[in-house]
Amino acid sequence: MKRILILVAFALLSVAAMAQNQRAGERYEVAEVSVNDEVYSLFTYTDDDGTFGYYLSLGHVDEHFSIGSILGSFTYSTYDETCLCMGATRDEAFASLDTILALYNREVGTVLELPARMCTGGNKLGQEIDITCEVHKKWLGGKRLWFYFPSGDDKVGVVYLNKGAVKQLRWSLSLDSKLHPDK
């Protein structure tokens, strides 16, 4: 009987811990996809003023140089990140992902500006910016999206997004909505 009571108490505490509200300044991952060396994650974020939203992380590793010696090699690289604004609700995030998927049907060379936020470090989101998205043709057919964003010291970062990655993120968001219908 004692074991059953402990098990029930543990279950209630687990449910209570999961039902807590998201704290300001923290990310909660909804989905993550890794394609080649790029990682794309869909997450929720709450600002200090209580504003809640969904964001698509466009992370990019930029390797600057490599030094080789007898002791081994050393590569200096930086991680730049910009996050696309996907909406304040799950339905808006679905609509944003559908809009991105529709871009693959547009003509090569199509360019548009999308709202985003810079990452300030420590997984915190900073100022709002507009980033450029351009539809490009893949070498062996098909299309991919190129996102251009500011990358410190007046440089421009570029992230390539394949249609399969967007479909996988959308599927993961759909799965999350079935697992957590009340969010």
Image (spheres, rainbow, N blue to C red):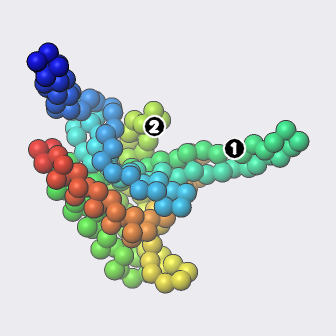
Measuring from the top left, give residue 58's x and y in whole percent.
44, 53
Residue 72's x, y, as percent?
81, 42
Screen quadrant of the N terminus: top left
Placement of 50 over or under 3, stated as above or below: below
Which of 143/106 is in front?
Answer: 143
Decide if residue 57 is in sight here.
yes
Which label sits on residue 76? 1
Work out which residue is located at the far top of the displayed protein and give it.
2
Residue 168, given in percent of the width and then of the height, sits at 34, 63
Q: Residue at x 18, y 52 (%)?
A: 177
Helix, strand or loop for disc 1: strand
- Three-letter residue code for mark 1: Tyr
Q: Residue at x 36, y 76 (%)?
A: 104
Q: Secondary structure at mark 2?
A: strand
- On screen, 79 above or below 92? above
Label 2 neighbour load within 10 Å: few <14, some 14-19, many 20+ = few
* Residue 175 on image: x %, y %: 23, 55
Q: Is residue 115 left or right of residue 14?
A: right
Q: Quadrant of residue 16?
A: top left
Residue type (three-letter) at the residue carrying disc 2: Thr
Badge 1 density bin: few <14, some 14–19, many ≥20, Cα 10 Å: few
